[in-house]
Amino acid sequence: MINLDDIEIIDEFEDDEPAIDPRKRGPLIGKIQIVDQAEDWVAINKPAFVPSLPERGKYTAQSVQEWAKNQWPDAILCHRIDRETSGLLLIAKNPEAYRHFSMQFEHRKVHKIYHAIVNGQLHFNDLWIDLPIIAEQLGKIRIDRKNGKPAQTRFKSLQVFKHFTLMECEPKTGRLHQIRVHLQSQNACIAADTLYGSEIPMLSWVKRKLHGTDTPLIQRFALHAKQMRIQAPNGNDLVLEAPYPKDMEVMLKHLNKYNQ
């Protein structure tokens, strides 16, 4: 069993220190932080590169589901987020709580907010994207107005830098890769999202007088599940929030220092 205290949190980076590649840090990357919990549910801050569910193939990281069942044998994930996405995941500790939460997800009563660092200067003021999407081979998703499934997302620029924008993303539906594909449709790819046309951003892009070896600003697409509002089984409204992980925190630190 892997306990919460078994894994050390990544230390702060120096200004010119390279972004750590989380894939090289062992079976559970970083510390799984419990954001909040009650008798029948727990909300965690999932590290990037930790899968929500067990995976086959080349990846060997322990999944959140496996970790949760080690803590609470009847635990069930109420939803999923992409492997590289960090942030909030809600876990029911028993089947009754799972049924309560899953009905809210099914009927789109859960309010979710993601934060993304997006390429370019973008001034989106509650931009509403309503474009259906469909899955292609090799795990990629694309816009398909005829055969796609409905997908709606609201976007709002929170902070505009010289070469990047911190974006608030509010998905109304919960399709796979929805936020990433909708941003791509606006020529606004998420930083380091190579599947949808972005490049790995380098420190030299924002720091002109760079001394030493150039290094990536971030090693995975910069998307974080930041906030969630949902009703608990006891009827109380839950407002949950997950702080940024170290890689996004440090990238934003670089942008605030060098890219204003």
Image (tube, grey):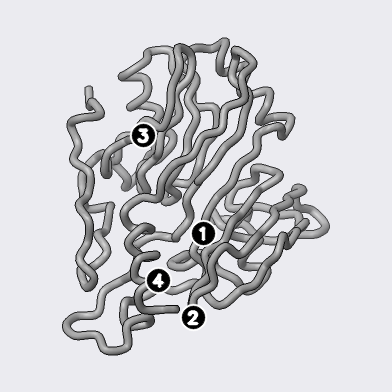
Q: From mark 3 to mark 1, how far is it between C-alphas?
A: 23 Å
Percent from the top left, x then y, of residue 2?
22, 27
* 210 left or right, relative to 235: left
Residue mark closest to the camera, 2 vs 3: 2
Which residue corresponds to mark 1? 116
Instruction: Specify the quadrant of the image occupied by residue 248.
Output: bottom left
Q: Secondary structure at mark 1?
A: strand
Q: Are marks 2 and 3 in contact (CB under 8 Å)?
A: no
Which residue corresponds to mark 4? 256
Nearer to the camera, 177 or 163? 163
Q: From mark 2 to mark 3, how far is it between C-alphas?
A: 37 Å
Amino acid residing under circle 4: Asn
Give the mark nearer the N terminus: 3 vs 4.
3
Which residue corresponds to mark 3? 63
Q: From mark 1 to mark 2, how far is it between C-alphas?
A: 16 Å
Q: How many C-alpha atoms fall within 10 Å of the one at disc 4: few (<14), some, or many (≥20)?
A: some
Amino acid residing under circle 2: Lys
Residue mark closest to the camera, 3 vs 1: 1
Residue at x-position 39% and y-position 65%: 252
* 204 left or right, relative to 240: left
Give the mark nearer the N terminus: 4 vs 2.
2
Q: Compared with residue 222, is residue 235 higher up or lower down, i.e. above or below? A: above
Give the mark nearer the N terminus: 3 vs 1.
3
Q: From mark 4 to mark 1, how far is it between C-alphas?
A: 15 Å
Q: Are marks 3 and 1 in contact (CB under 8 Å)?
A: no
